[in-house]
Amino acid sequence: MGIIRFILAISVVITHSSPAFGVSIVGGQMAVQSFYIISGFYMSLILNEKYKKGSHKLFISNRFLRLYPIYWCVLVLTIIWCIIMIYSSNKLAENSLMTFIQYFHTLNSPTFIYLVLSNIFVFGQDIALFLGLDQSNGGLFFTENFRLTNPHLHTFIFVPQAWTIGLELMFYLIAPFLLRRKTWLILLLITLTLSLKLFIYNSAFNHDPWTYRFFPAELLFFLLGKISYDIYTKIRTFQIPRVVLLGTLLSVILVTVFYFWLPFNKPYLYFTGFFIALPLIFILSKKSKIDTYIGELSYPIYISHVFLLMIIQSLKIPFIESKGTTLIIFSVIFSILLNVFITNKIEKFRQKRVLKFEEKQTN
């Protein structure tokens, strides 16, 4: 499943820059929601097969260890680069640190604390898209459309794409209580969340951020991942021909990459095929070290590419074919380095914690 995660991460990179070799892939929003389905699948897998009941604290802390070190590294580097740009530019640099400096005198204490903590711990970053800053008193207010506010509160976020990680973290907190439930209950919740999403799309809220940043509605995709895992548990003992597995993987890759060129590019068709195909793709790839290695690049690519785009634009680095292609190359190289120097070391520690927990359970 790693190659799919990699392609989805590249799709987000392209969305924030430009097409690579004329291809836009599936688009940022659908890529993010596809990640949610994969997350629901993986969390169901590890909660039911790796983390036993009673290991909620271990599960949550290990997920935090998986996400935060890379995020904090990129956050620190982003702040450093913002400082460099402010002091090296002849005019005021447009970045999140400059936004903080510009509006610092208008922020009241609760607002300032919220912005600082959400930048550090990610939780609540998605809420910034539902809030505005009242410059008369420095407080925050709810807004149906953040684009009608000034300044946009999300411009205070140094790693702006990390709002999706905030949704992931909220899902992790409830996952142990949710993903071990009976299938009928999950189907009921899918029905409710789907109804909520349909209501949003057929109401005055049919716009960003409601269409894909509102957690109660986005829970639909995590739950689809849970159903995908249930399908996997039913078919994993079947002798499925390898040609079928390869054909499924290739089909998902082609549809994802050339989505906008297809005559039937409807999101509901894509997501339906995606969550049904995941069990077959996982059966094919679960023992592949190459696929795992490629998949491990997806998170650092996702979390670092906006920082790298800032550097490319600031230094006016010549494009290789296009801005998108250049950013992809920089993001992949940088992500390999992040995995070598951070992720791999943290992963050893995470696995030791799991082994220690299992030893305590058996004693």
Image: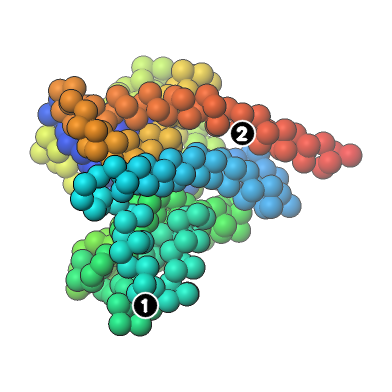
Tell me which corner region of the image, top left, top right, bottom left or bottom right, holds residue 331: top left
- Under tag 1, what secondary structure? loop
Q: Measuring from the top left, give residue 143's x and y in whole percent.
A: 28, 75
Out of 251 and 242, give the one closest to the viewer: 251
Q: Decide which of 193, 306 is in the foreground and name it.
A: 306
Query: Which residue corresponds to the image point at 55% horizontal and 31% vertical from the top-left?
Result: 342
Q: Residue furthest right?
A: 363
Q: Horizontal placement of 135 versus 283: left or right?
A: left
Q: The residue under label 2 is which amino acid type?
A: Ile
Q: Residue 138: which disc? A: 1
Residue under label 2: 346
Could you say where residue 346 lies in the image, as x and y percent from the top left? 61, 33
Observer able to see residue 223:
no
Tell me which residue sits at (40%, 28%) in the image.
334
The answer to whether 266 is drawn above or below residue 114 in the figure is above
Depicted 10 relative to depicted 171: above or below: above
> Which is nearer the eye, 88 or 62?
88
Res 247 → quadrant: top left
Disc number for residue 159 = none
- Horizontal and vertical percent position of residue 246: 36, 20
| Location of residue 123 in the rendering, given as x and y in whole percent from the top left corner | 48, 59
What amino acid is at disc 1?
Gly
Q: How many marks?
A: 2
Indicate which label's residue lies in the foreground, 1 or 2: 1
Q: Is residue 341 left or right of residue 242?
A: right
| Cα distance in 3D space between marks 1 and 2 | 39 Å
**Residue 352 left/right relative to 221:** right
* Apparent side of residue 189 relative to residue 314 in the rendered image (left or right): right
The N terminus sits in image quarter? top left
